[in-house]
């Protein structure tokens, strides 16, 4: 009898829990999160304009874009997105800003391109958390506001003169200044010392190691923190035979970190997403760059030095200072300022054409992570000659003659 009473009690408790679950689920179904936002929006409209909203119906709203393979329901909550009277309203009721760019909103018709093509996120979702893409298996979370500029490259083939894309322009300047292409490759162009950059932002989030990332475990946060401290985010893992990141710590400012992060994200945007393609009719092709004209062979050689990313190892203007752990000669890649004293022109050509692996400072430690690639198949004869002229020109004019320094 006692056992029967216990079973009856358990049955009643289970039935109560199940009934509570159905009640909560039913309440959420008839009173979803987005409904509350729409009710607040209509109140905001009446407060700001003194008139009721033109379409006061409570319903899911969406922008269906078959060409993009997207359906964006962001406007279910962001109802004032195209209502100029809501310019001063708080989020999520405010009008989309024009970013201070004449004609921006006219050129970016939300009914034609939606929201997620620029902002990312999960367009079909109907809750804030899911809509912003913060779900375990959603690979495209909403970008932070300052980084949506990266997706300009989805449509625009040339952002150098694009209003509002100054962050990408700055990122490109830093990319060339630091010589990133000297170690990385971009769409197959560059070197195999470091990862291919066109694939970085497009990788599955589970392909990243977040054990040493302090922020949110997203691709964006990984890239940001790696730029700030490469060795902290990618330390050596002897158990797996993985060396620490060979990328130098450039002590970048926050502004520089965000500019480079936006640039790396733009590489994947430019490559395109086969799941969510951008129709060709929305593409704005870039104009071909004019053929450069150089005042001298030294100026041409300097351009070659920058084009191939030599600064990644040898520093700005060949001044060195780039760490190369366990390399002889002080643990740094060599300076090139006095390279003409150690090599004849022909010897220097041979090193550049065929490459070189640096000697270890300590034989029982891992080899230096940076090495001189072979450039024979990449440099044209003309480029090699003008590069020689540039490297020889680096020696200061007032330097003491060889053998008489100090």
Image: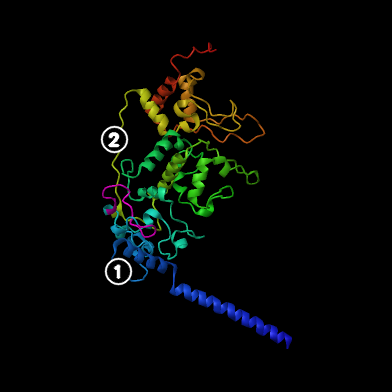
Residue 269's spot in the image, x, y percent? 39, 50
**Disc 2: CA contacts within 10 A as few (<14), some (14-19) or many (>=20):** few
Which residue is found at the position 38% from the left and 50% from the top? 151
Q: Which residue is mark 2?
A: 290
* Residue under the point 43% across and 58% down: 121
Please state the horizontal and vertical placement of residue 240, each as a whole percent of the image: 63, 46
Q: Is residue 116 left or right of residue 15?
A: left
Q: Quadrant of the C terminus?
A: top right
**Colour mapping used in the image:** rainbow
Query: Which of these two is toward me, 4 or 20?
Result: 20
Position above or below: 171 against 298: below
Magenta stretch, main secondary structure, is: loop
Q: Image height check: is 208 above or below 397?
A: below
Which residue sits at x=59%, y=26%? 330
The boundaries of the magenta stretch are 89-105
User: Which label's residue is closer to the chain start, 1 or 2?
Assistant: 1
The secondary structure type at the circle numbered 1 is: loop
The quarter of the rendered structure image containing the N terminus is bottom right
Q: Is residue 291 magenta?
A: no
Give the crowd class for mark 1: few <14, some 14-19, many >=20 residues within 10 Å.
few
Which residue in the structure is indicated by mark 1? 55
Image position, residue 44 (x, y; %): 35, 63
Residue 101 visible at all:
yes
Residue 187 appears in the figure:
no
| Cα–Cα gap, marks 1 and 2 | 52 Å
Q: Horizontal and vertical percent for residue 335? A: 51, 25
Q: Which mark is residue 76?
A: none
Specify the quadrant of the image occupied by residue 10: bottom right
Please tell me whether residue 76 is drawn above or below residue 184 in the rendered image.
below
């Amino acid at each position: 009898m006692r056992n029967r009473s216990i079973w009856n009690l358990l049955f009643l408790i289970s039935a109560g829990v199940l009934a509570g679950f159905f009640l909560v689920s039913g309440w959420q179904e008839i009173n979803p999160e987005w409904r509350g936002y729409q009710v607040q929006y209509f109140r905001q409209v009446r407060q700001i304009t003194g008139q009721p909203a033109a379409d006061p119906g409570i319903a899911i709203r969406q922008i269906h874009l078959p060409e993009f393979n997207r359906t964006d329901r962001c406007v279910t909550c962001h109802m004032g997105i195209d209502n100029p009277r809501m310019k001063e309203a708080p989020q999520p009721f405010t009008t989309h800003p024009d970013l201070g760019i004449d004609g921006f909103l006219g050129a970016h018709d939300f009914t034609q391109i939606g929201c997620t093509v620029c902002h990312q996120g999960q367009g079909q979702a109907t809750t804030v958390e899911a809509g912003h893409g913060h779900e375990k298996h959603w690979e495209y979370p909403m970008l932070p506001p300052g980084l949506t500029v990266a997706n300009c490259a989805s449509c625009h083939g040339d952002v150098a003169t694009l209003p509002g894309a100054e962050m990408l322009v700055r990122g490109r300047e830093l990319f060339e200044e630091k010589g990133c292409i000297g170690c990385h490759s971009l769409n197959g162009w560059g070197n195999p010392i470091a990862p291919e950059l066109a694939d970085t932002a497009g990788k599955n989030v589970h392909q990243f190691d977040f054990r040493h990332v302090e922020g949110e475990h997203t691709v964006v946060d990984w890239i940001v923190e790696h730029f700030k401290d490469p060795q902290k985010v990618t330390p050596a893992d002897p158990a797996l035979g993985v060396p620490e990141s060979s990328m130098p710590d450039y002590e970048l400012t926050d502004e520089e970190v965000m500019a480079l992060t936006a640039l790396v994200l733009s590489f994947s945007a430019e490559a395109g997403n086969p799941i969510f393609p951008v129709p060709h009719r929305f593409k704005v092709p870039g104009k071909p760059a004019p053929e450069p004209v150089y005042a001298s062979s030294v100026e041409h050689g300097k351009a070659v030095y920058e084009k191939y990313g030599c600064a990644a190892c040898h520093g700005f203007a060949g001044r060195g200072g780039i760490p190369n752990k366990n390399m002889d000669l002080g643990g740094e890649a060599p300076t090139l300022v006095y390279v003409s004293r150690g090599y004849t022109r022909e010897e220097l050509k041979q090193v550049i054409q065929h490459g070189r692996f640096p000697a270890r400072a300590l034989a029982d430690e891992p080899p230096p992570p940076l090495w001189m690639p072979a450039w024979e198949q990449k440099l044209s004869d003309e480029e090699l000659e003008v590069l020689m002229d540039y490297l020889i020109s680096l020696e200061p004019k007032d330097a003491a003659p060889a053998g008489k320094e100090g």
